[in-house]
Amino acid sequence: MDELNGRMIACQILITGLIARVANDSPDPLRFLTDYRDEIKAVVRGINIAGMENTDRVRQSALQTIDEMFSLMKPPSSE
């Protein structure tokens, strides 16, 4: 289980860096991030989670993770 958690954290870091890079190349980074976050949340809300008794808990955890990832992003430096 620790290996799986480590891989998930690594994927989150990789995805966060990729999103930040694309957002920085966008003419309006804040709008890009907001739209992208909303799209990701829509996907998580609509995805079918099979084989679990409490899918609401898994879905809520995924939505919370999305919020945490996007809250870590900062606006581009003016320097």
Image (cartoon, rainbow, N blue to C red):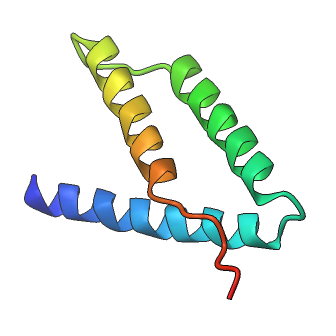
Which x, y percent locates residue 15?
Answer: 52, 62
Residue 74 left/right relative to 57:
right
Q: Residue furthest front?
A: 79
Which x, y percent locates residue 44?
Answer: 52, 28
Residue at x 24%, y 12% (from the top left corner): 54
Residue at x 63%, y 65% (from the top left corner): 75
Q: Residue furthest right?
A: 27
Which of 31/51 is in front?
31
Q: Quadrant of residue 46?
A: top right
- Specify the quadrant that holds the C terminus: bottom right
Q: How many marks?
A: 0
Q: Quadrant of residue 72?
A: bottom left
Q: Quadrant of residue 21?
A: bottom right
Residue at x 41%, y 59% (from the top left corner): 12
Q: Residue furthest left?
A: 2
Q: Is residue 30 above or below residue 75?
A: above
Q: Residue furthest bottom?
A: 79
Residue at x 51%, y 50% (from the top left corner): 70
Which of 2/39 is in front?
39
Which x, y percent locates residue 60?
Answer: 35, 22
